[in-house]
Amino acid sequence: MVKESKNFIEIIIDQDLEQGFDPADLCFRFPPEPNGYLHVGHVKAIVLNFELAKKYQAKINLRFDDTNPENEDQKYIDAIKENISWLGYSWDKECYASDYFQQLYDWSVQLISEDKAYVDSQSSEEIAKQKGTPTEPGKNSPYRDRPTHESLSIFNDMKNGKSSPGQHVLRAKVDMSSPNMLMRDPVIYRVLNASHPRTKTDWVIFPMYDWTHGESDYIEQVSHSLCTLEFKPHRDLYDWFLDQVVDPKKIRPKQREFARLNLSHTITSKRKLLFLVESKIVEGWDDPRMPTISGLKRRGYTPEALKNFVKSAGVAKRDNIIEMSLLEFCVREDLNKKCNRMMVVQEPVKITITNLEDNHKEILVVENNPEDPSAGSREMLFTKTILIERSDFMINPPKKFFRLSVGNEVRLKGAYIIKANEVLLDENQAVAEILCTYDPKSKSGSGSEESKRKVKGTLHWVSSEKNTKVTIREYDRLFAHPSPGQFPTDKLQSILNKDSMSVHAGYAELALSKSKAGDSFQFQRKGYYIADKDSSEELLVFNKTVSLRDNWKNKHK
Ligand code: ATP
Ligand code: MG
């Protein structure tokens, strides 16, 4: 599944090494903005950077790009760190762009002094109007030739809280007629009335992303700064900013771009995910339907499954949408190896085994995981009355119905072969009880000829006399549309999958009652489920991770 060939980033790095770049100078970073929880798209960037650091035995920093205090919060910083650790990665240094505010300020003063930056006192609307279009050059601001000492003095006032937001901005003096619109004198500082999660009110001027990012890479001596494709046009600016400060004796960071990971039926934009949270469409950032790392974890995804998924999706140079079914395949594959099997009946119907004594109580030893002999076995209680799924019995079965019907035999998983002889109906003509006989010689694993007898169907079951009642949350895709990302935020509500969650009661074998939040199981013939943090001593709650087979396509033709 996982491709072992080199990705194009590794090819670039190898070329640099061949050309004499010292491997000891390799350094990477993962630079999230702490304005929301990380999502599955970020997993791709995390895996890419951390695996490169591992492969080349290089350093890697976790850097918070915290330059927009209005949207940022300590709770996001904490969640991001927890998520990356959960994925199994550790970073060399924990860095914050805000730690470089003084250095960035000093460099800005230097730019002004060198006539490479100026304070513009126009409104943002006026500045936008002068930007021009991709085919038409922009117009110079009337403040472009403002004397250096004046810009220096106003910039100092801005820093000291003497100007209000929007009154002045600092712009780099690059080129108002550049074919790259981003080079047309970009704003590099603005005044904001916001308390920053870390610097609080020490700073009221905040550097813009482009100005901050490359310089932060340089300060940290990051060698290869990997970002998503939308930053490709920013590369000229990244380089221009570096040109202004780089010491030729030091490492000059190199920006390279790879394709974002987009996943079908969900969104990978923190802003839109925040909308889902704030409008209470989901129950929070870690709602099991969210594509956030926290949501996926709570849904039962494992770090291995997520890593395998992004590795299988590959590192591409062009944007594409990966099918959710690939993600589901990866988690199924991992859980199949790891999870113990359990029997849980959701919509029960009662079976009475008429050739058993009323108080029959037999302990059966059942294998925990056929994929993993070291997983051992557990005990299951077999009694005269048991429960099976209502859908596993039919009064008038069609031809290829291999489950239970009158006159037919099925095997009870891990137990005996039973035969249905009679159905009792309730006043609404629904099946109330099925009278069966069992074949005492057919016990699973007993080695007898009868135990090897083949019957077409095998059903999961639990004792109706002693079982554990649980709550089961079945989940499905949050959006009915395959690419919700293309819709604006205010339209998201209209493309939700109305059946993305349903809550059911379940009757589980007793062994399940010992489980704790975070434990995953395969509920036989149903899918993979994880015990949720909402579980209490009295009632366990399980979230469905994924079904055993991909049945989305059949349901949504
Ligand atoms: P969002 O739009 O969700 O806020 P972002 O790019 O603004 O995403 P950042 O916190 O700035 O989020 O991202 C941190 C790093 O993760 C960046 O290097 C970014 O390029 C990368 N990244 C973000 N989204 C994806 C994605 N869908 N696929 C791959 N990498 C991504
Ligand atoms: Mg970003």
Image: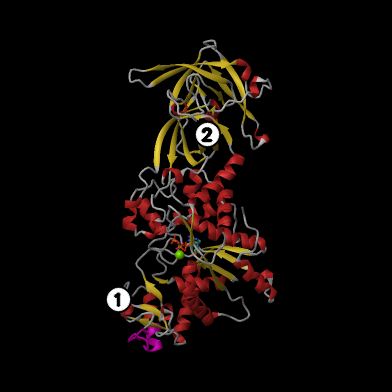
Magenta span includes 64: no
Q: Position of residue 274 (x, y in %)?
A: 38, 55
| Mark 1 touches mark 2? (CB < 8 Å) | no
Marks counted in the figure total 2
Q: Residue 408 bears which disc, if any?
A: none
- Residue assigned mark 1: 125
Q: Amino acid at mark 1?
A: Glu
- Along the horizontal axis of the image, is 74 left or right of 9? left
- Along the horizontal axis of the image, is 143 left or right of 63? left
Query: What residue range appears in magenta?
Result: 136-152
Does 475 sit above or below residue 274?
A: above
Which mark lies nearer to you, 1 or 2?
A: 2
Badge 1 element: helix
Q: Earlier in the sequence, mark 1 or mark 2?
A: 1
- Residue assigned mark 2: 525
Neighbour tally class for label 2: few under 14, some 14-19, many 20 plus, Cα within 10 Å: some
Instruction: Give 92 or 178, whichever is nearer the viewer.
Output: 178
Residue at x 53%, y 28% (from the top left corner): 460
Residue at the top extreme, as displayed: 357
Residue at x 40%, y 87% (from the top left corner): 149
Does 479 sit above or below residue 130?
A: above
Q: Position of residue 404 (x, y in %)?
A: 49, 24
Magenta span includes 149: yes
Does 94 sit above or below residue 546?
A: below
Q: Is mark 2 within 8 Å of ligand 1?
A: no
Q: Amino acid at mark 2?
A: Arg
